Image (cartoon, helix red, strand yellow):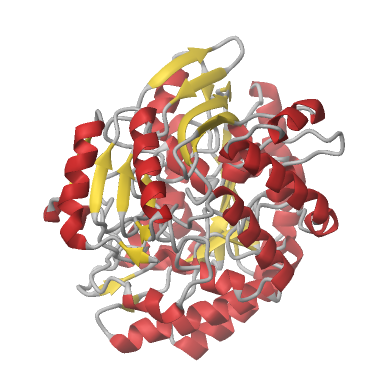
Amino acid sequence: MLVVLWEHMSKVAQYLNEHLLGEVTTSGSVRERFARDGSLLKIIPDMVVHPRSTSDIRKVARFSWQLSEKGHILPVTARGAGTDQTGGAIGSGVIINMLAHMNEIYEIDPKQKLIRLQPGVTFKTLNNALGLYGLEIPSYPASQDYSTIGGAIANNASGVLSGKYGATGEWVSQLEVVLSNGDIIQTGRISKRDLGRKRGLQNFEGEIYRSLDDLLTENAQLIDSLYVDVQDNAGYNITQVKRKDGSIDLTPLFIGSQGTLGIISEIIMNAKERTADHLVGALAFRSYEALRDALDQLRPLTPAVLELIDGKLFETAINKGKKYPFYTDVLDGGEVVAIVLFEFDNHNGRAKKNIGKKIANLFKDDNDVEVALADSPDTADELRALRNVTTLTVMPDKDGDSAPPVFDGVYIPPERFEDFANSIAELEKKHHVSLALYGHADQSVYYARPQFNLTKVSDRQRMIKLLGDWSAAVVSRGGHLVAEAGEGRIKAPFVYARLDDDIKELYESIRAIFDPQNILNTGVKQSGDLKQLVSALRTDYDGGDFAEYAPSN
């Protein structure tokens, strides 16, 4: 098959402009702008489409499908705000930009706590609107000020509250999806009887249900073995699709699929009542043993927030002039290896006071732990500011340096955390980098942001080698490489290199059912060529693409 030649792109754009309500452009400056997302990759698209309706998306998909039937591939990539850090929001061919026009909140039903909206609505806009009714979607990621709901669903994004309230996918009720051939489907759980009717349809939807149902039946034992009770966004969420009663729901497949199975065009979500009365506190630790034991004690108490931050990150921030009163106060007693910020919600005044006493009593005789509890809104904000230390530390001051987000969002089993931390110390020595950990301790999801100068070939090679060793350290301890967001382009080669062949074949079969022409977000969630990936690395990546937004609390 041939990729559509560039000299024909202007004619393609003109044809699409004649048939769409939205706009299509092949402008070099626009294409350059959409060649980047939150990752350190760059892929220049052939054109950018700003759809104004679901019909526009359908027409673009149908056009691409018809071209592929003639042997010409025009890949289609759906994009929200472009915050994806794995390269999932860029691609050759057509970029469908949801942010421009597909950003309506159609309706909010406060009684049923349901919202119907388009994928280009940002998390901040949605939660501000829900706040008028005392509601919220609690899975908001750190990029909530500017990231979109559609992107969050496509990545099954999570955030600081997800340990208690789950990732974004758990708040999705139904989806409207444009399939790769331009047809449209509504997802939702259907009974075994209704599945029989779907199987009888003589169209692409019927073909999908027939093929998928057969695949589920043939691979039932393998699918059962894939079930885990922690978040793992690698591949496709096939374990939640079919129940023992024979009912099927396609929704879980699209959640976390990064636009490779279909393009989300409308969403129905559930919301929860917003809680305002939080107990906020912080713990400082002088040993990893004390940290391990404390986390084991805190997790069963079901905190809303449990954030772990390596003490080295505070030292970096302090050297830049930042002040953290709690951290500097506890330094008087000796070195601090880590800080843990915690919050408890759903408590009235008396319950909040009781849990505060319980935490203070847990650690009152431990010389390796110091506790601070907020006694006013001001001190609560002061402690919450501890979490934002990473904002300073992941933005290098030296020109050319960057802290790429390729080591983000790994799951480490709680019982293996100390072992993992020790292995990280070995990697630091081997690769001559700092791998200070931070993350969501209640979810056991962690990040590291080592610094490299990507203008140097040697540093790019060193980063890829470290990523290989990092991946091995995670997997060998029973962890997952993509517990947050998706594998996209960057992590996919490392994820699929460690999957069994039958699991890879299962994921490939799912994709082939929904996208037989391989036109949806080509190269994302696929093994790919590591050399080709390296060739797409941006040498100018500095992490500053969204620096105009304040950090989220």
- Name above or below for residue 173 compared with residue 414: above
Count of numbered circles in the view: 0
User: Based on the displayed image, in which of its 4 quarters is residue 188 positioned?
Assistant: top right
Residue at 15% from the left image edge and 51% from the top image edge:
10
User: In the picture, which quadrant includes the C terminus?
Assistant: top left
Q: Is residue 454 left or right of residue 528?
A: left
Measured as percent of width and height from the top left, residue 472 is found at: 62, 78
Residue at 46% from the left image edge and 20% from the top image edge:
130
Work out whether residue 144 or residue 225 is closer to the camera in this orientation and state it: 225
Single out the residue that lies furthest toward the top.
111
- Name above or below for residue 305 compared with residue 184: below
Measured as percent of width and height from the top left, residue 155 is found at: 51, 48
- Name above or below for residue 332 compared with residue 208: below
- Name above or below for residue 425 compared with residue 200: below
Residue at 27% from the left image edge and 67% from the top image edge:
541
Q: Is residue 373 left or right of residue 489?
A: right
Q: Is residue 469 left or right of residue 7?
A: right
Q: Is residue 214 left or right of residue 30?
A: right
